[in-house]
Amino acid sequence: MTDQKTTEELNAQHVSPYDLAINQIVQNRKRAYPSIEQQLDMLYWDKINGTENWQTAIDAVKQQFPKPE
């Protein structure tokens, strides 16, 4: 897996505004998502308790940083 490029690197490569926006959304989501360890723990307890805490947490981040249409 490759690292995401910074906005400055993308600007220097003359990347489209849409691609810049998507890159920023991806970076924001990465910072906002719970850690993988926390997500796995949520999934485990969701399975045990019949809850949807993991899905709720992921949906909240996706709503906070929506992709453009």
Image (tube, rainbow, N blue to C red):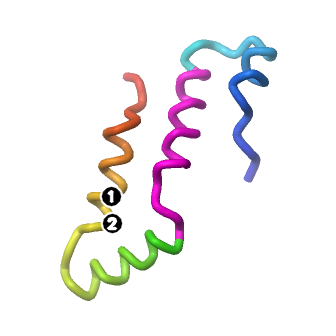
- Asked if residue 57 is positioned above or below residue 62 in the image, the reply reads below
Residue carrying label 1: 57
- The reply, left or right, for residue 7 in relation to residue 65 is right
Q: Amino acid at mark 2?
A: Trp
Q: Secondary structure at mark 1?
A: helix
Residue 36 is situated, as x and y percent measured from the top left of the image, at 53, 68
Q: Residue 47, image x and y in percent?
A: 28, 82
Magenta-tinted stretch: 19-36
Residue type marked 1: Ala
Q: Position of residue 69 (x, y in %)?
A: 37, 22
In-front residue for pair 32/12: 32
How far apart are labels 1 and 2 at the CA level?
5 Å
* Residue at the extreme left of the image, as rendered: 50
Direction from residue 44 to residue 49 in the image, left or right: left
Q: Is residue 5 magenta?
A: no
Quadrant housing residue 39: bottom left
Q: Which residue is mark 2?
A: 54
Residue 65 lies, in percent from the top left, at 40, 35
Residue 35: numbered disc? none
